[in-house]
Amino acid sequence: MDMIQTERKTFLQDLNHFFHKEEVPFGPALFRMALPFVLFLTMSIRWQWSRELFSADGAPAPLAVGYGYPDLTPLLPGTVVVALHTLLLFSMICSIIGWRTRTSLFLTWGIYTYLCCCDGMSTMTKYSIISSHMLLLLALSNCGKVWSVDSWLEKRKEKKNGVFRSIDDYPRFPIWPRRLMQLMIAIVYFGAAITKIHTHGYFNGDQMHFWMNTNINNANPFGEWLTLFPGVVVLMGYIAIVWEFLFIGVVWTRWGRLVAIGMGISFHAMTTLILGLYIFPLVCFSCYLLHF
Amino acid sequence: MKRKLANLFIASYLAVMSFGLFSHTMEFMHGSHPAMYFIIWDMFCGWSAYENRIHIVGEGESGAYYDLSQGPWGEFNPYSDIGRRHYDYRGVNLKNISDNVLAHTEHEPMTRIFIFEENWSKKYNMPDFVWKRLYDEPKELRSYFAVRQVLTPESQVAQSNPCWLTRCAQTQFADNPRLQREAQSSNPYLSIATSNRKSSRKTDQSSADEAPLFTEQQEPDDLFSPAGN
């Protein structure tokens, strides 16, 4: 009688496979195009206000001041800040097209994070922090090795040297930067669920009711109408918190991913409709590209 | 070697993120340093029942009052048609706005700068058709104004008051002996909140009556929320 021998992997081997399996970085490449594009939208509208928002010549609002560290953030003169801001926009475009990708992403990460820290009033938000994490991890990844100007230039150089690669001969790299980015967004959801548990009035819908009744984000007429149905708001609140808790556990399998990402898209689309959020959902939609 | 460095980075990154989750869950050191803002995910830390707006007014030596709310080059509206100053919920950077206006405009010498807070109930934000279905009374917006800060001409904080909602909570607390008794008898005997904050604001106004009750009291975080757009 034949026996089927199966290899039993240890936890460390599983972990090693989880982080160091090699793959073509299509997901990170898509994310590299999407995230800087979204951030470009937010930072380009601030360019003409750069001196006022971020420089020592204007009215900066360093994030650290609120924590009792008034001198932690070095504030630069207006001219330098405008130059940095311009360089940021340029490096974002370079990141999108994938030219000098790693350098561009490091520049984008550094300048973006610095400028956000200088304006805790209107530029630094939680989506800025998520983006900052993601830009750093993207810079460490090999997202510029496919679908980029860099990869095109490299192939052209190889062609000149007589090396020909087929169109589907893509380079493969360890998956760990993508895994960290996936874990990062899952941890964000988990933390957001903990926040909701801490928040008085979340489970009876009061907080959502108040949020839907303000235009502090943007106009949200659908949300104002929805305040007529408090039961629906409570139900949606419960669904949201369950989804946020479970996301980190279910997103790693095929069907779990479809459900978790599908609910995520619905959730963030609803935040646009009922709360007037735009950039946060776009950042999260970009992050979902990492799961495919 | 490359893999070892990668493993080191993965472990460090996940450890930092886990600490953020722990800190947030246990409310341990969560406000101790600006770096904590990078690892704590409190996107929904609460919205109050009141809408809040900020007004900055300078008093000139002639007795005339000047609107210092909007920057010298106009006002930046980051998300909707609401100006940037209204997003400083803690009021810690508002003096920079008046400084900026005064530094880039011609004006008579100022004697004082007032930062006012305007509040109104968010129910008045409802569209009329929603209001009519929920309330029988006419929709008449009532705003409440309170002085949040008074600055000297050199932009030093001469007077600083807690935000209006905190003041309401304090007043209710001071008027309620039962709450006071319960607060004094329900103090936790073990405190793990650690904060090395240095005060960046000066205040010369303190109520002798309220001092024992509100020593070390911070403005509650869940009255407002950072802009989570």
Image (spheres, rainbow, N blue to C red):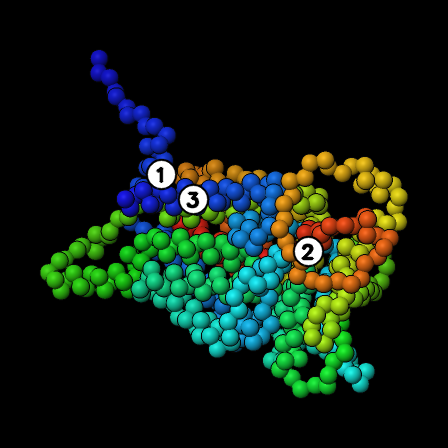
- Cα distance between the residues tagged 1 and 3: 17 Å
Rendered residue at 87%/41% (across/down): B178
Asked if the residue at tag 3 contacts the one at tag 2, i.e. Cβ–Cβ closer than 8 Å, the answer is no
Amino acid type shown at disc 2: Phe
Q: CA distance from mark 1 to mark 2?
A: 40 Å
Work out whether residue B143 or residue B106 is closer to the camera in this orientation and state it. Answer: B106
Q: Residues within 10 Å of mark 1 (few under 14, many from 20)?
A: some
Q: Quadrant of the C terminus of chain B?
A: bottom right
Q: Residue at x 33, y 55 (%)?
A: A143
Q: Which residue position is annotated with label 2?
A: B224
**Are the residues tagged 1 and 3 within 8 Å (C-beta)?**
no
Query: Which callout, 2 or 3, points at the residue further toward the start of the chain?
Result: 3
Query: Is residue B41 rendered to the left or right of residue B135?
Result: left
Question: Mark 3 = which residue?
Answer: B12
Locate residue B36, reporting x and y percent.
55, 50
The x, y position of residue A109, in whole percent, is 43, 60
Closer to the eye: label 1 or 3 = 3
Numbered label attached to residue A18: 1
Residue type, mark 3 in image: Ser
Chain letter behind tag 3:
B
Rendered position, A69 above or below B181:
below
The tally of labels here is 3
Asked which quadrant contains residue A156, the reply is bottom left
**Horizontal relation, residue A269 to residue B54: left or right:** left
- Which residue is pictured at 37% across the width and 30% down the height? A11
